[in-house]
Structures are given as structure tokens and as C-alpha cells.
Image (cartoon, helix red, strand yellow):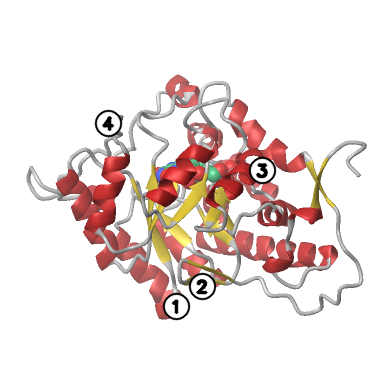
């Protein structure tokens, strides 16, 4: 395993192709899935030399939480589909690597158990955020927020790009429309109506509006990030509504197909928020050079989704840890080659569009 791509190749050798499609797939023609990665290839790095970058610091502080590297684990559902320990494996690996994990609301282990596993490895310094789909039943949403807060999660990442579920035609063709027997969205276990042991389904809610964000802002004192806002005008509204950060994400191309690559939107989005709140970018980040490009153009950190799933499928906890160590080393090496000593040295002049004549 020398790089992120190797984990996918190795995982596919043993993984049920139905689950490989679930991980790799996106909405409709998967135009945005491809665009995310292609956008990084469309930029070149123009490094500085002779800057004395022997000591390099990759640590980042986001909304008060410190991480050893600016690469977060974006929220991904259903880790037990690919490894028996599920999210416990992911959380232990992230804690060992000093990485910040965003726990998916659709995790197959309850958030409290995930947090305990992370702390058993990384102690009280471990930071976990919780990804939330606001449920039309606000009492259910409140109960979920309480579970995440009680587990010690320090921020809420509210995914807003899913008023309805994205149309993944691979899953439809494969007949994958439910979790296999014995796997559940454990965060929704025993939430109101019904006998104990009952697990609700996650509801997507087309009725969601900024009023729900205002309601959540009143309901919790945790920082709130919005994940999936793509229009600069919505970024400005987010700031006006007291949101604390954005995850600039198109859900890895899994919701609306043909939206722009997140990297293409980053300059406009950074200009819209004008440094008032941090931006975490995800979608197509596969290399240390990708991280540098995103940070140079104004992201405070990046997130990775599929790479973590492939590593989990390939070898569980130890492989996720290995993946994060590889990315950490790649980023460190890229910083050195760019003449940078820290993340603050990554500025827009480091990046140019590919092609001739951009002097
Ligand atoms: C996701 N993503 C996602 N997002 C979210 O807010 N809640 C979720 O439960 C999930 N689940 C999920 C499952 C799988 C298998 C994938 C691949 C993705 C989207 C995820 O957080 C992230 O935005 C993208 O995965 C980032 O793009 P890359 O790194 O996969 O290219």
C-alpha cells in the first residue's frame, strides 16, 4: 500500500461488488463524481524554493478542536457493511492518527460507543463531530442531538444537500435498497414510538428551510457546520444565520449530478464567507498535493470519504490508520517541496490552472 488508490484496488479483490458499487457510486451519470477528482488534476502547483522549511507543522485547530493533520474523516454511513467492528475500527484508527472524525448519523454503531472506542485509544484529546440529517420530527432530532452531545461530540455537521435521496443507479440495478439483516442505524434505536429495540429509518426532508437551522441554533450550544451548501449566496446566508462553519461538499457526487466540483467552487465560496467562518472541502481528495491545492485556495481543512471506506474494507482499523499515516506523510513531503513550513504558508500564488499562458 503506497497510496490511497492501492486500498481501493486491494479492497475490490475481496469485497462484494454490490458494496464496492455502493462505495464508488454516485448519482445518475456520475459526472460530478469524476469532476471532483479531475478538478485537482486541472491545477498545477508552483512551488517556492530556498525557504528553510525543515520544521513543518501540519496541525490545525477548527472551531476549538485540534487535529494533527488537516484531513478529516468525512461522515460515511454503514461501516459494518465492510468490516465487522464497523465505526469502532474507524474511530480507533482516527484517534491513533490524531485525525478528526465526523461520525455519520447513519452509523451502524451508536455514537456513544464510537466515542468510547476513540477515547480508549486517544484519551480526552480526541475530537469527534456528529453529522446530522434534521428529521421532520423535531423531537427526534432533539434526541439525536442529545445523544451526540452526551457522547462528547463537539460540533454538529448538518447535511443539507439531501432533501431527497440521490438516485444511485448502481444500487438500483444491484437491488441494494436496505441494510443486510442484523445491521441498523444504531443512533435511531429506541427513539420514541414503538417497543424498545425499535430502530427508525432516517427520513430525508424536502420541507427543510433556514427556519430549521434557526431552530437548531436555539436548541444547541454546539458549533453548527452546514455540509452541502454550494451557492455563494447560501454561504452568505449561512453566516447571517449564525452558522459556525461550512463543509463545502457535493456529497462526493452522490446527490445532484452535474453540480460543479467542490474545488471549482472554493474560490467563490471563500470570497463569500470572507474568513468569517472556516471552510472544510471534501470530494475527490486523494493526494497530499490535493490537500495543498485546497488549502492554498482558502479551505481550512479537507475531508475524505471513499478512501476511508476502501481502507476499512481492505483491512479494517490497521488499514485506516495506515491510510491516514500515508496521507500525513504525503502532505508533509508536499509542504517541503512547496517551501512551506505550515498550513498558513499555503496561499493562492502556489496554484495555477493547467495549460499555457497563465503568467
Ligand atoms: C457518504 N457521504 C455521506 N455524507 C453525509 O453527510 N452522511 C452520510 O451518511 C454519508 N454517507 C456516505 C457513504 C458513502 C459510502 C460515501 C462514499 C459517502 C458523503 C461524504 O461525507 C463525503 O461528502 C464524500 O464521500 C466526499 O467525497 P470523496 O472523498 O468520497 O470523493
The residue that mark 1 highlights is: 125
Callouts 3 and 1 close, C-beta under 8 Å: no
Callouts 3 and 2 close, C-beta under 8 Å: no
User: Badge 3: how crowded within 10 Å, few (<14), some, or many (20+)?
Assistant: some
Q: Quadrant of residue 109?
A: bottom left
**Distance between the alpha carbons at the discs numbered 4 and 2:** 35 Å
The residue at the point 42 percent across, 36 percent down is: 161
Q: Does label 3 or label 2 sit earlier along the sequence?
A: 3
In x, y percent, where is residue 154? 37, 66
Q: Judge depth for marks 3 and 1 and give the one in front.
A: 1
User: Badge 1: how crowded within 10 Å, few (<14), some, or many (20+)?
Assistant: few
The residue at the point 39 percent across, 76 percent down is: 120
Secondary element at image label 1 = helix
In x, y percent, where is residue 175? 40, 23
The residue at the point 66 percent across, 33 percent down is: 35
User: Badge 4: how crowded within 10 Å, few (<14), some, or many (20+)?
Assistant: few
The residue that mark 4 highlights is: 207
The residue that mark 3 highlights is: 9
Where is the C terminus found, in terms of image quarters? top right
Secondary element at image label 3 = helix
Amino acid at each position: 500500500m503506497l497510496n490511497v488508490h492501492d486500498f481501493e484496488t486491494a479492497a475490490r479483490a475481496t469485497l462484494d461488488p454490490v458494496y464496492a458499487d455502493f462505495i464508488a457510486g454516485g448519482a445518475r451519470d456520475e459526472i460530478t463524481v469524476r469532476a471532483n477528482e479531475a478538478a485537482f488534476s486541472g491545477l498545477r502547483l508552483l512551488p517556492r524554493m530556498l525557504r528553510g522549511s525543515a520544521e513543518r507543522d501540519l496541525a490545525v485547530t477548527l472551531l476549538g478542536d485540534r487535529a494533527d493533520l488537516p484531513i478529516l474523516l468525512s461522515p460515511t454511513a454503514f461501516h459494518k457493511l465492510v468490516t465487522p467492528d464497523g465505526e469502532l475500527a474507524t474511530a480507533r484508527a482516527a484517534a491513533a492518527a490524531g485525525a478528526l472524525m465526523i461520525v455519520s448519523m447513519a452509523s451502524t454503531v451508536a455514537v456513544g460507543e464510537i466515542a468510547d472506542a476513540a477515547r480508549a485509544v486517544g484519551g480526552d484529546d480526541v475530537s469527534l463531530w456528529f453529522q446530522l440529517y434534521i428529521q421532520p420530527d423535531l423531537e427526534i432530532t432533539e434526541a439525536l442531538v442529545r445523544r451526540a452531545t452526551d457522547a462528547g461530540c463537539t460540533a454538529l455537521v448538518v447535511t443539507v444537500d439531501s432533501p431527497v435521496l440521490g438516485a444511485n443507479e448502481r444500487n438500483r440495478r444491484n437491488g441494494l435498497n436496505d441494510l443486510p439483516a442484523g445491521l441498523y442505524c444504531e443512533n435511531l434505536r429506541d427513539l420514541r414510538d414503538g417497543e424498545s429495540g425499535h430502530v427508525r429509518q432516517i427520513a430525508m426532508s424536502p420541507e427543510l428551510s433556514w427556519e430549521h437551522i434557526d431552530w437548531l441554533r436555539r436548541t444547541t450550544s454546539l458549533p453548527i457546520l452546514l455540509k452541502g451548501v454550494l451557492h455563494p449566496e447560501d454561504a452568505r446566508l449561512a453566516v447571517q444565520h449564525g452558522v459556525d462553519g461550512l463543509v463545502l461538499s457535493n456529497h462526493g457526487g452522490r446527490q445532484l449530478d452535474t453540480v460543479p466540483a467542490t474545488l471549482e467552487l472554493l474560490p467563490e465560496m471563500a470570497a463569500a464567507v470572507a474568513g468569517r467562518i472556516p471552510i472544510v472541502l471534501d470530494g475527490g481528495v486523494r493526494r497530499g498535493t490535493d490537500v495543498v491545492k485546497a488549502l492554498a485556495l482558502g479551505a481550512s481543512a479537507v475531508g475524505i470519504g471513499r478512501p476511508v471506506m476502501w481502507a476499512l474494507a481492505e483491512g479494517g482499523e490497521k488499514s485506516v490508520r495506515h491510510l491516514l499515516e500515508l496521507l500525513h506523510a504525503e502532505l508533509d513531503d508536499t509542504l517541503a517541496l512547496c517551501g512551506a513550513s505550515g498550513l498558513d504558508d499555503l496561499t493562492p500564488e502556489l496554484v495555477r490552472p493547467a495549460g499555457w499562458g497563465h503568467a
